[in-house]
Image: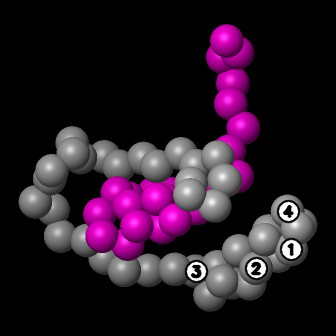
Amino acid sequence: MSDSATYDAVIVGGRCAGATLAAQLAQGGWQVLMVDRDQLGSDTLSTHLMFPNTLARLADRRRQRS
């Protein structure tokens, strides 16, 4: 096994939005790495943020895979 890995997406934050996004991408065949500073089951409040070009980048990536 290699010490390095390649991912299609890195999700920072594993709360409502991050975990859902990571699961959807993984079900779509993406290699996904999800990282969070807290342990699973943390009661830390989540924020819901996507960068302005997120949807466009996801659409471009989907077209590249087709």
- Residue extent of the magenta highlight: 1-25
Whether residue 11 is visible: yes
Q: Nearer the viewer, residue 43 or 29?
A: 29
Mark 4 falls on what kind of element?
A: helix
Residue 51: image location, x then y, percent = 58, 80
Residue indicated by mark 1: 63
SS at circle 2: helix
- Residue of label 2: 59
Q: Nearer the viewer, mark 3 or mark 1?
A: 1
Q: Residue at x 58, y 49 (%)?
A: 32
Q: Amino acid at mark 4?
A: Arg
Question: Looking at the figure, which quarter contains the N terminus?
Answer: top right
Residue shown at 46% from the left, 59% from the top: 23
Give the label, 3 or 2, closer to the camera. Answer: 2
N-terminal label among 3 and 2: 3
Q: Which mark is in front, 4 or 3?
A: 4
The Cα–Cα distance between marks 3 and 1, rounded to whole angstroms, is 20 Å
Q: Is residue 26 above or below residue 65?
A: above
> How busy is the neighbourhood of tag 3: few (under 14 within 10 Å), some, or many (20 plus)?
few
